[in-house]
Image: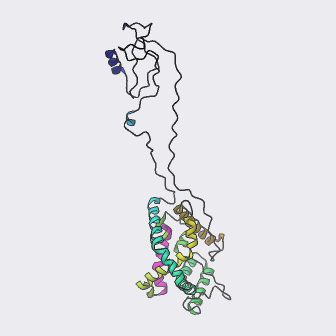
Amino acid sequence: MTLLASAALLAVPAVDAPAAPEVALVQDAQGSAAGAATPLPQDAPSDPQPSTPVALPQAPAPSLDQIGQDDQAIVVSGEKAPKQDPMQSVNQASYDAVQAVDDAVIAPVANVYEKGVPRPIRMGLRNFLRNLTEPIVALNFLLQLKPGKAAETVGRFAINSTIGVGGVIDVAKNKPFNLPYRRNGFAYTFGYYGIGPGPYMFLPLVGPTTLRDVIGLGIDRFLMPFAIGGPLRNPGYVYGSFVIRSLDERVANDELFKRIREESNPYASYRELYLKSRQAEIDALKGKADFQKEGSVKLPALTPTPPPTLPPAPPVSEPVPAAPLAPVFVSEPVVQPLP
């Protein structure tokens, strides 16, 4: 019997071959090669095989690459980055780092700045820094073939620089002038002429931006000293203005930042809000809305963005017991598949 089983093992094909049919093996008490007519008694000590028919399992043998692997292992595939955010993993890490610094340093300092500096002084500093950008705003209105808006901007700059005490008081926005502040720059000019935003980025000292906006902002900052004068190149002004603008922006957008952090995926919501807002400003510049009077361009509603989730594990089906089959008597040994 052992020799027959060994020969059968050698004759079996690769382990991934289909399992042998379910049959029962019954041997003759005298070991004859012909089909047995009478099964061995159950208490026969010489043969460990049970006398009742045994149904062999039909499950196929595992393939070679499955041997030695955990059945409960889950393969997780990376989430594909959106088209406008090809560097999502890097931007996400930068966003998380900035939020940690914001919680530890920027938000507490901005809170002290808001409570310690009276609002008229904070508004005066904001107006002063805005007034310095007016020549760049007027230049870009000219590049966009909007001479009327450029003339209004030049008038704002002249009025606020004189009557408004160097721009500290925004006199031009009130009656009888009625010249509101309008944002503009080279990034807007690029968008006006159809240049796309390019990839989205979240930079530590800049925040949410795009490639188009980074280039446009760089040109704005480069030309400002030539338009205003040499003092803007002074390191004291450069660093001081950056700190004041950052704190003022943090105070002004505190409620917005809290709203974003309540989203299920704050990073994706912040990205969506920034891209939608910038597109709304470009559309307004093209005449689809009143161009960027403060409060005229409404922030778009955020689309709920669920956090990235791992794919669920495939359900494990319960084994279904095989229906008992009638015994089939054969004269050749049947070998059970390898486990």
Give the residue at x 60% y 63%: 302
Among the 4 quarters of the image, the one containing residue 230: bottom left
Report the quarter where the C terminus lies. top left
Q: Nearer the viewer, residue 210 or 254?
A: 254
Among the 4 quarters of the image, the one containing residue 235: bottom left
Q: Nearer the viewer, residue 20 or 303?
A: 20
Horizontal relation, residue 184 to residue 92: left or right: right
Give the residue at x 53% y 85%: 117
Magenta stretch contains residue 131 = no
Q: Indicate whether 72 appears above or below 143.
A: above
Q: How many marks?
A: 0
Report the quarter where the N terminus lies. top left
Q: Is residue 135 visible?
A: no
Q: Main secondary structure of the magenta part?
A: helix
Horizontal relation, residue 285 to residue 308: left or right: right
Give the residue at x 39% y 15%: 333
Residue 201 rendering spot, x and y as whole percentages: 48, 65
Q: Indicate whether 236 appears above or below 190.
A: below
Magenta stretch contains residue 224 = yes
Q: Is residue 93 visible?
A: yes
Report the magenta residues as a range.
Answer: 208-228
Residue 124 rendering spot, x and y as whole percentages: 55, 86
Give the residue at x 57% y 84%: 119
Q: Nearer the viewer, residue 148 or 90?
A: 90
Residue 11 rendering spot, x and y as whole percentages: 35, 20
Horizontal relation, residue 300 to residue 206: left or right: right
Q: Residue furthest front?
A: 43
Q: Nearer the viewer, residue 261 or 154?
A: 261
Residue 158 rendering spot, x and y as whole percentages: 58, 89
